[in-house]
Image (cartoon, rainbow, N blue to C red):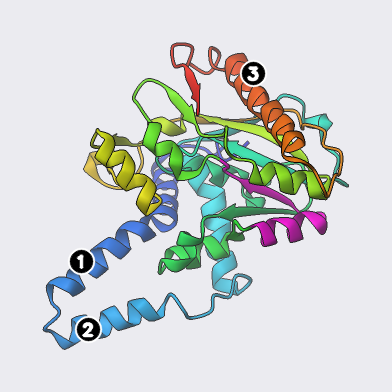
């Protein structure tokens, strides 16, 4: 699944590489464009370009337009094949097309790039309706907001998540989020879940099943460096993300070609409870954490990670 069956060759390499550039290059393009404009602020062309770039934040995106759909199909077809990414199930028959699911995917890693294999157009998840949810920062970033909107990604807000699940549309979220970057260390996997009650509460309110999901290999797609010390931890918590330096192939933003495997666990049954207490939410969250730990332990040896421990925060 997920692009690994394409025949390899020069054309294959070019198509997969370009898919990664189109999908992942927006963030670094922003840094480049803004940097050039700021370095040439006395020039009219720099001011014009900067104004246009800012305007891209507010110009409405047409997610269902011809161009957007073509770009989305291209990315979903070739980007997973770049690594490649495989998607495997503990029990694919455990899914019911009439039910809605919360695919709670871990880890976030430096960037959750493996999630492209779970996008609706990739066709790897056995549900008829599916939406991925991402941080609002994505939708305030020129070019990035366009590409991710074309891919069918929406803001990860309580309102949107609830509306999708109530309509029978399953969602993909990464509950640990960028907070996990604060705890990253080489040679181990980390997930930040012990305080993530929100997605569980919404699942209980809508009666949606929670699916433990783990991506093996994603953490190795980039090399990185970050400062240490309490000041860094305090800064990261204050600004809401973890500033660090990272690089991929040849020192560029292009990720290393690291094989990944997304393992989809069995859904956790959830009884609908619109007025769940904190204790009831905490109990289901603990079930999910245990399922993630079990998923990791059951598959890590076969996938080449037997010496990499999983830490849960």
Which residue bears the numbered disc 3? 294
Which residue bears the numbered disc 2? 47
Say left or right for 88 vs 259: right
Which residue bears the numbered disc 1? 35
Give the CA separation, mark 3 to mark 2.
54 Å
The location of residue 234, given as percent across then percent down, is: 32, 43
Say left or right for 47 vs 134: left
The location of residue 244, given as percent across then percent down, is: 28, 43
- Quadrant including the N terminus: top right
The numbered dot on residue 14 is: none
Which one is earlier in the sequence, the residue at label 3 or at label 2? Answer: 2
Q: Label 2 crowding class (10 Å Cα cut-off): few <14, some 14-19, many 20+?
A: some
User: Can residue 225 be seen by looking at this rendering?
Assistant: no
Which one is earlier in the sequence, the residue at label 2 or at label 1? Answer: 1
The location of residue 103, given as percent across then percent down, is: 68, 41
Say left or right for 297 vs 254: right
Magenta segment boundaries in residue numbering: 158-175
Q: Are marks 3 and 1 in contact (CB under 8 Å)?
A: no
């Amino acid at each position: 699944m997920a692009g690994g069956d394409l025949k390899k060759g020069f054309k294959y390499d070019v198509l997969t590489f370009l898919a990664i550039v189109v999908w992942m290059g927006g963030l670094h393009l922003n840094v480049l464009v803004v940097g050039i404009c700021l370095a040439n602020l006395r020039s009219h062309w720099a001011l014009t370009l900067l104004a246009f770039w800012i305007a891209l934040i507010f110009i409405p995106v047409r997610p269902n337009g011809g161009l957007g759909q073509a770009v989305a199909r291209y990315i979903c077809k070739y980007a997973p094949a770049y690594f490649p990414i495989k998607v495997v199930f503990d029990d694919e028959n455990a899914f019911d097309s009439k039910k809605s699911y919360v695919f709670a995917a871990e880890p976030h890693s430096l960037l959750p790039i493996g999630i492209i294999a779970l996008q609706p157009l990739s066709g790897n998840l056995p549900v008829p309706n599916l939406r991925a949810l991402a941080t609002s920062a994505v939708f305030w970033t020129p070019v990035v907001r366009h590409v991710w909107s074309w891919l069918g990604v929406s803001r990860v807000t309580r309102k949107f998540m609830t509306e999708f699940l109530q309509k029978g549309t399953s969602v993909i979220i990464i509950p640990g989020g960028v907070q996990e970057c604060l705890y990253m260390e080489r040679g181990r996997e980390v997930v930040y879940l012990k305080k993530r009650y929100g997605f569980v509460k919404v699942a209980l309110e809508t009666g949606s099943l929670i699916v433990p999901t783990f991506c093996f290999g994603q953490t190795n797609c980039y090399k990185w460096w970050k400062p240490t010390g309490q000041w860094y931890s305090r800064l990261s918590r204050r600004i809401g993300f973890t500033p660090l330096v990272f690089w991929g192939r040849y020192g560029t933003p292009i990720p290393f070609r690291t094989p990944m495997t997304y393992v989809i666990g069995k859904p956790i049954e959830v009884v609908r409870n619109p007025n769940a207490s904190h204790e009831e939410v905490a109990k289901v969250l603990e079930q999910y954490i245990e399922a993630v730990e079990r998923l990791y332990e059951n598959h890590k040896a076969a996938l080449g990670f037997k010496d990499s421990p999983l830490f849960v925060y």
